[in-house]
Image (cartoon, rainbow, N blue to C red):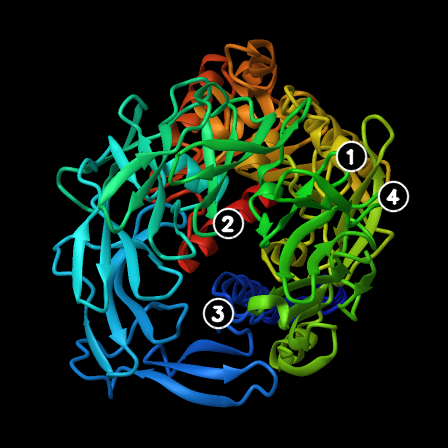
Amino acid sequence: MFFNLRNHLIFDIFVISKKEHKMKRNIVLLIIAVFVSVNIFGQSTLLKNITSGKYKPSESIDLISSADGEYYFKATDANSKIVKYSYKTGEEVETVFDAKKARECPFDKFEGFLMSPDEKRLLIYINSERIYRHSFKADYYYYDIRRNHVRKLTENKSKQMVPVFSKNGRMLAYVADNDIWLAKFDFETESQITKDGEARKIINGATDWVYEEEFGVTYLMDFSHDNRLLAFVRFDESDVSEFSFQFFEGQLYPSLFSFKYPKAGEKNSKVSCNVFDIESKTIRKVDIPEAETEYIPKIEFVDDVQLAVVTLNRDQNNFNLYFSNTRSTVSKLILNEKNERYVNFVLLSTIFFLPDQFIYLSEKDGYSHIYNYSNTGVLRKQLTTGKYDVTALLSVDPENKVVYYESAEESPLKRAIYRVDIEKGNKTKLSAQTGTNTARFSNGGKYFINQWSDANTPSVISVHEAKGKQLRIIDDNKNLRDELTKLNLPKKEFITVKAADGTDLNTYVIKPANFDASRKYPLVMLQYSGPDSQLVLDRFSADWELYLASQGFVVACVDGRGTGARGEDFRKCTYMNMGIIESDDQIAAARYFASLSYIDANRIGIWGWSYGGYNALLCMSRSDVFKAGVAIAPVTDWRFYDSVYTERFMRTPQQNMAGYEKGSPINYASSLTGNLLLIHGSADDNVHYQNTMEYAKALVNANKHFDMFTFTDKEHSILGAQSREYLYTKVVNFFSKNM
């Protein structure tokens, strides 16, 4: 509209008298300036609103289920109260904590809480300090609900982390300075269980960096059912090499942050499983075959004595489940699963143990499905079958023998919630709406909170009975829906394009709101492409790609081979050869888009973050189809990345040097085509800044010119609304200038 009006006004200048020319010209320029400023203001406001979270819908409720599954506890009043609500009615039952009324409470607000299993005690924390992506330490306070009294958990000066209640709620284990402490609430005493904890050497109970990042666990501790034993994993990271980087923080002399980071092929922490006898105050080491045990990513008591211990070998293709007798320390192998490529630990992380059986996810038939085993290791039944993936085990109702799960049965682009009867095998779909459903169940699976959205609808959060009946809607994000309707933002269109080998790849396309099929548009391809990842989903998102489309770009996102929810062969086809198939597929997709009448084949760009940045660099070096590209926090050589993630998909450099060499963008630097912008945070503890620095050196040596930007003291995610707005503005400006 703006361009048409401008052209009309300029045409008028040539038909008016010469006398009026100067005045008319000034008016025209003023009008153009107004339109330009309004347009720029509107666009910058859109990006500011996106990065500030204004268009982010309310999502899953942060709550803790009661032990009986009938109620939940939730922080209210700006985190000054904890209130008990009924799942069934949504009504407030009682206030279990009020900072203004609790006796001797030293704080007005808190950051989070834990409820004891007997619901007589609370653990509340303030002053948290982030350690890595998930872990943190904080000042914890103990609150006796019956006495309405608050006291510090411990008089130790060090902050505490990863607290775990005993099954009866009368004791608490926690970690401070890498040692485990045990608090007994009945006696108001505490004692130190381990005494060998030492920074960057020995960790008891908590986990090291790589376990937190790649196995998703911040602690490995559990109490026995009779509350007499505490099992924990001990990490000896003495031989793990350290990585260091500077924090500048406006200091005259920057500080140095060092931590243990095992890179591919290098030494990992040595792990052992131990049991503390609370009465005798002795520690016993559980006997597990060391030759087959590189990792212990999960432990859980099955009863008073038997401890389930999950182990993986270093290649992560041999999974063992042991039941260890914690009195005798003898372990019995219950289940072994081998895979010619790797065992997907994300599936194993949610094993549910029942009194005489267990439920877990396996890919043994080519898709991830639910299996039911007896506690002696005998297969009882495969509960789900078909050419689709079960994407999450959600809950088990041991009383009614029902399993609840999420799956991509309808489509890899969608998620639905189901229940299946353990004994009869009857399956029932619980979610009513098509799109992406996620669910959070109460204890025992009596109720669940469902979060649904599709590509055009922000999240609707609702409460349901176990059999699926909707009880009420908690939040339908109506205000956000109304706001977005006024903006008339472009919509996602779902299509398929061909991979390099002809396989159909799921894709979404976003066209500018005023799209004109007779015009030629520049295209920016967004992608992540990492193993078992997915960006192309029928779910709501109002992120920076909308701003990119508002600037006149067509946006496309293609989930290439190696991504998730399409069976084991599809997601594992990149094994030992990361980067090649993924870049082949993005290049093939780009060439397809280049053939479309509304795409300018000479103005195609690619963007990616982390694995996506890595793949963007390979795409720009293994083809000449991309005019410009942006790589944020990219891996540039898998030898620089951590052992667990890298070796899961590539094995070690010693085993697969050819794969590492072939998949390193550094080795393709001399072949780079197009205009490149590299972006990285200088304090990235995940994909180290080293990756970008080494790649930049390779580009200089190859006489390849490029642009580069560093976010000082920012980690991998470059968090913060101002930082994100700055980042995306820079990215869009780069594409606008170079395409």
Mark 4 and mark 1: Cα distance apart in space: 40 Å
Q: CA distance from mark 3 to mark 2?
A: 28 Å
- The disc placed on residue 366 is 1
Q: Nearer the viewer, residue 333 or 154?
A: 333
Q: Amino acid at mark 2?
A: Val
Q: Nearer the viewer, residue 209 or 677?
A: 209
The nearer-to-camera label among 2 and 4 is: 2
Of circles 2 and 1, the one toward us is 2
Q: Position of residue 50 (x, y in %)?
A: 54, 63
Residue at the image position 32 percent from the left and 24 percent from the top: 240
Nearest to N terminus: mark 2 or mark 1: 2
Label 2: which secondary element: loop
Horizontal side of 618 relative to 561 (left or right) equals left
Which sits earlier in the primary sequence, circle 4 or circle 1? 1
The residue lying toward the viewer, choosing from 331 and 493, is 331
The residue pinned by badge 4 equals: 597
Tell me which label, 3 or 2, sits earlier in the chain: 3
Quadrant position of residue 374: top right
Q: Which residue is mark 2?
A: 302
In the figure, is residue 501 to the left or right of 359? right
Q: Earlier in the sequence, mark 2 or mark 4?
A: 2
- Residue 472 lies, with reference to residue 197, above or below; the image says below
Mark nearer the viewer, 4 or 1 = 1
Q: Position of residue 527 (x, y in %)?
A: 65, 41
What residue did someone put label 3 on? 62
Q: Residue at x 76, y 60 (%)?
A: 421
Task: Indicate the amino acid at tag 4.
Answer: Ser
Q: At label 1, which amino acid type do we have? A: Gly
